[in-house]
Amino acid sequence: MRVTVLYFGVLRDMFGARDEVVELAEGAAVEDLLRILDGRTSNVTMEARIWQSVAVAVNREYATPVVVLHEGDEVALLPPVSGGCD
């Protein structure tokens, strides 16, 4: 099955794209997708912190790692945000 992954913030920089289509096995869950994507990154220290705190939305609804994905789903990966004014 194919899902569209949308990257935001630092994840957009890490993957060098705003979005991509990812092929997954039928019955794959959010955690399976995250495991695949994590395996494609190289900066272990930085990515570990990001992956631990990334928020995931499936079809514009926040989702937990156990949510099962379906053909055509849109998965948004939202890293933690920091910064601002004092």
Image (tube, rainbow, N blue to C red):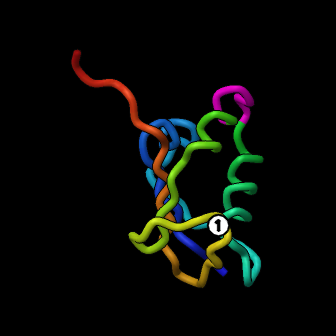
Q: Quadrant of the N terminus?
A: bottom right
The residue to which callout 1 is attached is 30
Residue sitting at x 70%, y 39%: 41
Residue sitting at x 74%, y 30%: 44
Asked whether, in this view, residue 61 is left or right of residue 46, the answer is: left
The secondary structure making up most of the magenta span is: helix
Q: Circle 1 — which element?
A: helix
Q: Nearer the viewer, residue 10 or 52?
A: 52
Residue sitting at x 63%, y 34%: 49
Amino acid, disc 1: Val
Asked whether, in this view, residue 15 is left or right of residue 10, the answer is: right
**In the depicted structure, whether residue 46 falls above or below residue 34:** above
On the image, the x and y values in percent for residue 83 come to 34, 24
**In the depicted structure, whether residue 86 falls above or below residue 16:** above
Q: Residues within 10 Å of mark 1 (few under 14, many from 20)?
A: some
On the image, the x and y values in percent for residue 64 come to 59, 65
On the image, the x and y values in percent for residue 45 come to 71, 26
Which residues are drawn in magenta?
Answer: 42-47
Asked whether residue 29 is drawn in magenta, I would say no
Number of numbered labels in the structure image: 1
